[in-house]
């Protein structure tokens, strides 16, 4: 806390790693968001063919991107931030639903493996739960793939700042 409150980073040796500490947040924010953007774009490539585990990693990458944008969004035009956050939130909700199904499958496997329950009752309940989720997934899959395609085509609002920063450094 003392290091933070006394701006201790100003007292350290200047190096390649410490140089960003001396920059304004406006100069650093686009680079930080770009890094998360690239990670998310890499993860969601060929989304339709991804496994449940890979889709879960997409969800996490999108969540990290969203948090970064929420943290640094005040540096940018509010309308541009909102235009990207809206589809990002929808994607996260739908991917969260997929993760709920994934979790439900795991919980049902645990229940079936437990000797404490009547296997017939568990099997019936599992069939109902899994059937309901599979029906929902069928309805959501095409929508989710479309949302992902639209999201991947979204123009990053921070890129002009990156290119302006690179041009001014040259």
Image (cartoon, helix red, strand yellow):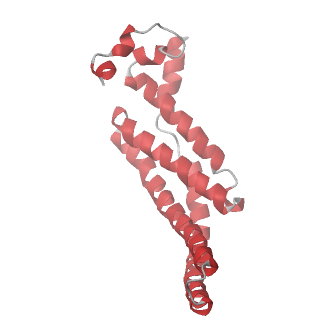
Near-viewer residue (107 or 133): 107
Residue lying at the far left of the rendered structure? 5
Position of 161 with respect to 51 (left or right) is left
21 left or right of 135 in image: left
Choose top left, top right, bottom left or bottom right for residue 72: top left
Asked where in the image residue 130 lies, by quadrant, the reply is: bottom right
Instruction: Please give the name of the residue rendered at 49% of the width and 44% of the height, measured from the top-left corner.
Output: 64
Which quadrant: the N terminus? top left
Answer whether residue 80 is visible to the viewer in this image: no
Asked if one can make out residue 64 in the rendered structure from this viewpoint, the answer is: yes
Toward the front, the furthest residue is 116
x, y (%) of residue 44? 63, 51
Q: Image height check: is 158 above or below 53?
A: above
Using the image, determine if residue 147 lies above or below residue 164: below
In x, y percent, where is residue 108? 58, 77
Residue drawn at x 69%, y 61% is 51
Of the pair 141 and 165, the residue shown nearer to us: 141
Q: Is residue 52 left or right of residue 76?
A: right
Q: Is residue 93 above or below residue 10?
A: below
Q: Residue at x 49, y 49 (%)?
A: 63
Residue 52 at x, y percent in the picture? 65, 62
For residue 102, what is the image quadrant?
Answer: bottom right
In the rendered image, which quarter contains the C terminus?
top right
- Asked if residue 37 is positioned above or below residue 132 in the image, the reply reads above
Q: Write the residue at 52% across / 68% down.
A: 100
Picture coordinates of residue 151 (x, y %)?
A: 55, 52
């Amino acid at each position: 806390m003392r290091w933070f409150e006394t701006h201790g980073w100003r007292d350290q040796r200047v190096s390649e790693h410490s140089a960003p500490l001396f920059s304004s947040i406006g100069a650093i924010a686009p680079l930080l968001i770009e890094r998360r953007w690239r990670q998310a774009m890499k993860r969601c490539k060929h989304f339709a063919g991804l496994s449940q585990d890979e889709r879960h990693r997409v969800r996490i990458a999108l969540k990290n991107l969203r948090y970064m944008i929420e943290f640094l969004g005040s540096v940018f035009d509010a309308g541009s931030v909102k235009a990207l956050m809206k589809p990002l939130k929808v994607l996260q909700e739908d991917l969260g639903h997929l993760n709920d199904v994934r979790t439900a499958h795991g919980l049902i496997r645990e229940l079936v493996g437990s000797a404490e329950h009547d296997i017939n009752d568990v099997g019936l309940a599992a069939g109902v739960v899994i059937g309901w989720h599979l029906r929902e997934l069928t309805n959501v899959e095409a929508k989710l793939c479309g949302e992902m395609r639209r999201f991947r085509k979204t123009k990053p609002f921070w890129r002009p700042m990156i290119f302006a920063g690179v041009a001014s450094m040259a």
